Amino acid sequence: MKGDFSIDVYAGSLIGLQSFYCPDMTSHATVTVIQDAELLYVDSNQVFSTGDEIQQRNLTRMITLELHKRAYRIKELERHERLQEQRLKELESLALLGKLSTGIAHELNNAVSVIASGSYWLGGIASEILADHFDEHERSLFLHGLENGRPGALSEDVSKIVQRDTERIIDDSNLSYSDARNIARMQLPIEMSERIMSLKDPMLVVKSWEIGATLHDLKVASHQATHVVDSMRELGARPTDEYREIDICKTLTSAVAILQNFTKGLELTVDSPDEIIYKGLPGEFVQIWVNIIQNACDAIASGDHPENGKIFVFASEEEAEVIVRITNNGPKIPDGLRPQIFDPDVSTKRLGLSFGLGIGLTLVKGIVSRYNGRIDVESDDEDTAFTIRLPKEFNETQVMKESGNG
């Protein structure tokens, strides 16, 4: 018999059952007795040739029970093997993700640092030089743009205001619809807008606002890029034995920064306290939020109205646990699919498309479970919500062991 294999034997157990059916008398296993025991040898020919029906029925029941137990043990071994293979695949995915994340962060770090420091210096020196050469109207527009930057995506209510202001500007000037709308989109204070419209050529002074807004956006973008690089480096960091206190809210911020390109055009709201201190590995929590938010983005994109997509992230801290709830208004997860949502190779996207970074909700549940936490999913025609509950008290040694650091 290949390898070492042991089973518990007790009174009534059958050993060498194969010999009842196989004419080959060669033993298929070596039985090692570790304590004194009485062993009974039963010859099947003797039992089934005596005509003793009671003895035959008893032996048949024993054989059937033993075969059932052996089949159960085989299934358990197969299940354990599948779990081990699944865990190995997860670790391989994490290793690949870590290498990619670390490599990207390394390549971008120097370039982003130059852009970040340069943008802050350029904003400061431009303020000193240009402000002195602008007239009163240009200076006020430049400083307004430098302080506030360009407005982001317009909500439905703001779009109505911009449209109303555009029509008003057209009525009060000779500007084209395009120029009037550009001024309206700047969302200037009323008094500043009126001063601009009193000028002979309003579009000339508007350029000073564009310079200020561009410098502002450059600084914000460089800061965001630096944050993304730091987040990617954290995501790709190898787990160590240094199990430390982390801020759950910062891991949420890092995940949002990594996914900013995917959440563009969506209404993403994060409602959390200033900090939630928790012991763990920050990279693991970034992976959880990245996968769930990415899944929400994909679900919304596959819906009928992706332009109205909303994602709401809520984090809170209670006496005994930390709760993070991520909700999206994408299509409902079918009732038949929801019970298997955390199984391997199951996708929530239409057409069976995969999602996220290729790690999957199976890995998400695995990480949450290692912290003795729980993840639940609710889905109806209005919203789909993933709720993660993390106990503040858990077996840290077991978490480190299952994370591969023990």
Image (spheres, rainbow, N blue to C red):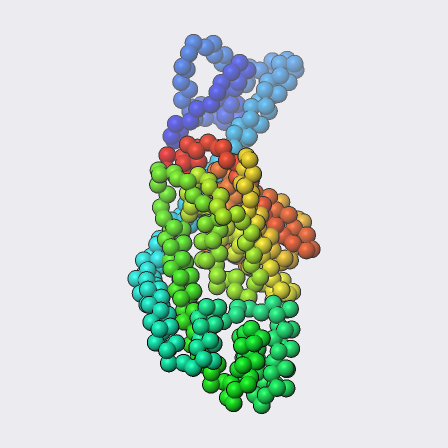
Residue 44 percent across, percent down from the top left: 54, 18
Q: Residue furthest front?
A: 136
Direction from residue 43 to residue 383 in the image, left or right: right
* Whether residue 190 can be seen here: yes
Q: From this viewpoint, is residue 111 visible? A: no
Image coordinates of residue 69 in percent, x first then y, are 55, 26
Residue at 44% x, 77% y: name it: 139
Residue most toward the right? 381
Residue at position x 33%, y 71% in the image:
125
Judge by depth and name the residue closer to the eye, 42 or 340.
340
Q: How many marks?
A: 0
Tell me where residue 326 appears, x and y as whole percent: 57, 51
* Direction from residue 59 to residue 79 in the image, left or right: left
Left or right? Give the position of 155 relative to 73: right
User: Quadrant where the N terminus lies?
Assistant: top left
Is 124 above or below relative to 398? Answer: below
Name the residue at 50% across, 62% down. Answer: 262
Relative to 149, say whether 377 is above or below.
above
x then y, percent, for residue 36: 43, 9
Could you tell me which residue is drawn at 33 percent across and 68 percent down? 121
Point out the image quarter for the C terminus.
Answer: top left
- Relative depth, front residue between 43 and 106: 106
The quadrant where residue 194 appears? bottom right
